């Protein structure tokens, strides 16, 4: 990992609380984003029948979300930066987040009704969808189809991988398609490959040559 300039150590903007040696595994799992008891899947709004207040509010909110203002959560293997979710009051029908996988990392294993698209920004890895493996690398799009039990893996033992995820989970839940199931929790153990790894808080262009094409 030391040979990869993209891997930073220390100084993460967000405290990864479950890395504390004082916590039990159950406490670490409880601190994960996916374990939150107060997540907002569909935001509510109220007002007059013409919902003018809501329209005025939507037109007044910022249209650009700054990465530097949004820290990563979770770890020590899989980290997430949640750019837009319904609770932010900007969108209602989709959820977009950045996933950072430490060397040798895996995500939680889970299933849901909604589809999801993973645009691979850098690294190499693979999916396991309903027991079938699908390999990916930077520039690829990995599609999670409806009602698929899946898990994501970084295939490299010394380099991180990163994916931008776009999904319409809020819309599906709004339509009462409520199936969501965690089969295996997001890992909270520190492996030899990911030890000391911190998510790359700064947004640096790893995908394209300097100066353009």
Image (tube, rainbow, N blue to C red):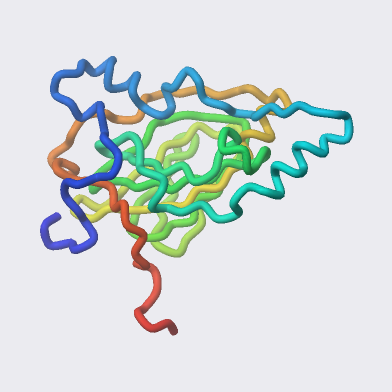
Comparing 147 with 18, the one in front is 18
For residue 170, side relative to residue 21 (left or right): right
Comparing 115 with 130, the one in front is 115
Where 199 sits versus 172, above or below?
A: below
- What residue is shown at x 36% (from left), y 78% (from top)? 209
Comparing 109 with 190, the one in front is 190
Q: Quadrant of the N terminus?
A: bottom left
Total numbered circles: 0
For residue 80, side relative to residue 50 (left or right): left
Q: Quadrant of the C terminus?
A: bottom left
- What residue is shown at x 47% (from left), y 52% (from top)? 164
- What residue is shown at x 60% (from left), y 23% (from top)? 179
- What residue is shown at x 37% (from left), y 53% (from top)? 162
| Residue 99, percent from left and from top | 40, 46
Q: Quadrant of residue 24?
A: top left
| Residue 158, percent from left and from top | 18, 53
Q: Quadrant of residue 64?
A: bottom right
| Residue 67, percent from left and from top | 42, 53
């Amino acid at each position: 990992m030391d040979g990869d300039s993209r891997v930073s150590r220390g100084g993460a903007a967000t405290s990864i609380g479950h890395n504390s040696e004082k916590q039990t595994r159950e406490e670490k799992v409880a601190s994960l984003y996916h374990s939150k008891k107060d997540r907002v899947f569909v935001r509510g709004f109220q007002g007059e029948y013409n919902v003018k207040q809501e329209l005025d509010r939507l037109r007044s909110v910022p249209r650009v979300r700054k990465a530097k203002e949004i820290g990563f959560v979770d770890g020590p293997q899989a980290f997430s930066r949640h750019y837009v979710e319904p609770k932010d009051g900007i969108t209602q029908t989709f959820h977009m987040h950045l996933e950072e996988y430490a060397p040798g990392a895996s995500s939680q294993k889970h299933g849901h009704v909604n589809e999801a698209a993973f645009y691979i920004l850098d690294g190499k890895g693979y999916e396991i969808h309903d027991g079938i493996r699908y390999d990916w690398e930077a520039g690829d799009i990995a599609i999670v189809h409806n009602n698929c039990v899946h898990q994501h893996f970084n295939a490299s033992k010394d380099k991180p991988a990163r994916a931008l995820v776009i999904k319409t989970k809020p819309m599906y839940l709004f339509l009462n398609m409520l199936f969501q199931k965690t089969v295996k929790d997001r890992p909270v153990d520190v492996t030899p490959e990911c030890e000391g790894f911190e998510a790359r808080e700064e947004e640096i262009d790893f995908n394209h040559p300097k100066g353009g094409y």
